[in-house]
Image (cartoon, rainbow, N blue to C red):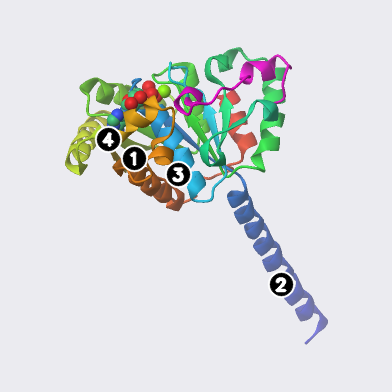
Amino acid sequence: MDQAATLKQWQQIRKANTQGAIALEKKIERYRYPRVISFTSGKGGVGKTNVVANLALAFSRCGKRVLLLDADLGLANIDVLLGLCPKYNIKHVFSGERRLDEILIRGPGGILILPAGSGVPDLVTLSDADKLFLLTEMEDLGDDIDLLLIDTPAGISDNVVYFNLAAQARVVILTPEPTSITDAYALIKVLFSRHQVKSFYVLINWVKDDQEAQKVFKQLAAVVDRFLGTLSLNFLGFIPQDEAIPRAVRRQRAVLDLYPHAKSSRVFMGLAQSLLKEGYDDYVDGNIKFFWKHLFRA
Ligand SMILES: Nc1ncnc2c1ncn2[C@@H]1O[C@H](COP(=O)(O)OP(=O)(O)O)[C@@H](O)[C@H]1O
Ligand SMILES: [Mg+2]
């Protein structure tokens, strides 16, 4: 082989290897960085906090390291639901009294909880220095978790919008109540028409059976189709009405923890497994730093 041909061949090999290495690196990054999923609802009281807490535990039973960001300012915060008593919340991080890793608490199955609760400031009012500080702190956490789940507030406030924009997947939770359906639509409409969010998972809670869940989903899908057209609603599943849930709530335990064989517990395990199987296509640059950057830029 003459020298020019050898050189060309060698260049080709090098190019292929470089491309391969880049692709591999990207792939590794995709899997290394935590996936961010927000759980949201138009209306309060639809069981969002309960769903997130149980799904977090279900993910951890699937071997995932989960961080749960409690950003729901409602009365029943995740820590109350799980019988935990956090001493500090995110407010103490901003005031410099505590570091982020010092305010995290462990819940059932070793899930990590970031108790933000009433300490969640209006994100718009955070100074650039605060944002940068939080970014750096969150970045350090990124290596230790596979999934970041966010329990967003209900409604369409700025914070709700920000959290949903920054997540890579959004799960909208609703019940068969007409107000819950109209409020879910209002939330989807804001995220789609003002912020171009085009894909949502829909989870129906508190139904008798699959038939009722499908009916609710179709009602929502019909209005979305009619007024918003191009966006995609994916039916994620449903959680049955289950007396074991309020019983577990009263004992401040996750139903999956206290009654692992209850029908809702089995559903939570199944939902976690199907969410884990979902493609990583929406995973653009899904690291946690990216999440916070998005959140602050929103
Ligand atoms: N599938 C269900 N079956 C029976 N009760 C439920 C179900 N889902 C939620 N609940 C009840 O609804 C209450 C409110 O749920 P919660 O998660 O606090 O709602 P949200 O966070 O949406 O305000 C819970 O305390 C629980 O007892
Ligand atoms: Mg709640």
Q: Residues within 10 Å of mark 4 (few under 14, many from 20)?
A: some
Q: Residue furthest right?
A: 3
- What residue is pinned by disc 2? 13
Q: Residue at x 52, y 37 (%)?
A: 108
Work out how far the residue at label 3 is from the one at label 2, CA to CA, in angstroms. Answer: 45 Å
How far is mark 1 from mark 2, CA to CA? Answer: 42 Å
**Does mark 4's beta carbon lie closer than 8 Å to ligand 1?**
yes
Amino acid bearing label 1? Ser
Read off the residue under disc 3. 58
Circle number at residue 232? 1
- Amino acid at the residue labelled 3: Ala
Relative height, residue 295 to residue 63 (above, below)? above
Question: Which disc is residue 242 wearing?
Answer: 4
Residue at point 58%, 51% (across, down) = 31
Q: Residues within 10 Å of mark 3 (few under 14, many from 20)?
A: many
For marks 1 and 4, give the CA distance.
29 Å
Tell me if mark 2 has few (under 14), some (14-19) or many (20+) residues whose alpha carbon lies within 10 angstroms of its own.
Answer: few
Residue 240 shows in this picture: yes
| Quarter of the rendered image showing ligand 1 | top left
Disc 4 marks which amino acid?
Answer: Asp
| Rendered location of residue 1, percent (x, y) | 77, 87
Q: What segment carries the magenta color?
A: 78-99
Q: Is residue 121 left or right of residue 22?
A: left
**Quadrant in the picture for residue 293:** top right
Amino acid bearing label 2: Ile
